[in-house]
Amino acid sequence: MGNARKYDEDAVLRARVLLLGSGRLDLAEELGAYRVLAEVSPRAYLPKLVGALLLTGYRTTVPGAELRLFAEAVDAARRIEATAVNRVELLHRALGAYERELFTVGRRAEGRAVCEEMYALSGDPRLAHVLAEEGRHREAAEILRRRPAAAPGFPPWDVYEAAAELSAAGLHAEAAEAFARTVGAGRRRAAEKGTPPPDLAWELIHHARLLEDAGRPGEGAAARREALDVVARLAERDGSGDPMTSLWATLFVLSGRSDEPVATPEAPMPPFGAESLRWSPDVREAYREDIPVLEAEAARLTAAGALPRAYTVHRRLTLRAVHFEHSHGAAPLLRPRFDEGVALARQLEDTAGALPQALTDRAMFLVATGRHADAHADLAEALGLMDASPIVTRT
């Protein structure tokens, strides 16, 4: 017993000397010292231990080490006294790193439990994304609808996510009303600046879908016509230089949710409507792994002459390509996919649904890449196919 206490005291002394030394410590030495000192001076050293564990976890190249380090960081953060100023922040950081790693290795139930703790701790909406991935859309919508409204001038992610989950839960009227907030903000920016922002075009198109789902087709048609007018006004500008954005990509990927399998806890799907970075790692990887499977299926269906099904599969491929490749400079890689979608749709015997959809998809892609005149031509054709009355173009 005496030898053990002597060893502990020696370890504490060595750790203090190590930290007080003038030499530069490597991270492993620093972590070892904090582990020892956190036992004898928890108030001073537990926060430092959490930081060192997280940094080590992010930097390690040892397979499986991340999970152990982040779990230890969570344990250390939980032991910080409740009155400490930075306890909530450190515990939240540790829980966030831990849950992402749990999802990476496929331990979803444990990851969800950690997200529940994060939500109880700070109201973090990450839990809503996880519930959405598992098809629990009404619960996800309830969390998201309780969030405070996004501050003016910030990207409207909160509105996108809340409307997406309300729609998935079958609350179509509420989804349309929620999304109307971001459309209204775009209209106000257009009035203030004299020129509409490009995102107003694709937000109006998405709002039209929500209105139609809510049984308000007349309002949906009006929103599509307003989108056409917005694109015409953009075309009158210079029509160049607008980079693709994750806002457009998020709404485009969301538009394909109905063609994807229904999400369940056993077979999770992406939280459509949420930004890519908010997807769980396992879900993102599964979405990526579908690409070669869908490519093979599209080739088989095309060769067999099953063009309606081939069009649907091709669109699912295009959605994935946009999700993973929409960064600046990727437009030349993505344009052929949209062209192929339009070409496939034109070959169908019944083009009433597919061709307007393919043309609208390409039009919004062209808006997102600054090709406004071309976008206007596509959108005018799409609306002409959807509406018996002729569309008068402005370009």
Image (spheres, helix red, strand yellow):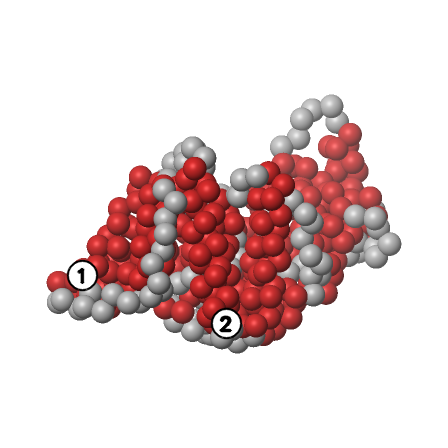
Asked which secondary structure carries label 2, the reply is loop
State the image quarter where residue 148 is shown.
bottom right
| Residue drawn at (78%, 52%) of the image | 87
Q: Is residue 162 visible?
A: no
Q: Position of residue 66 (x, y in %)?
A: 55, 51
For the residues labelled 1 and 2, say whether their Cβ atoms are less than 8 Å apart: no
From the top left corner, tell me how far across and down residue 175 is, in percent: 57, 68
Identify whether 86 is placed above or below 102: above
Label 1 neighbour load within 10 Å: few <14, some 14-19, many 20+: few
Residue behind mark 1 = 347
x, y percent for residue 122 = 73, 59
Label 2: which residue? Answer: 216
Q: Nearer the viewer, residue 108 or 357?
A: 357
Identify the residue at horizontal 31%, vertical 62% (top origin). 385
Compare residues 63 and 340 and report the one nearer the observer: 340
Rendered-image quadrant of the C terminus: top left
Q: Is residue 144 visible?
A: yes
Residue 325, numbered circle: none
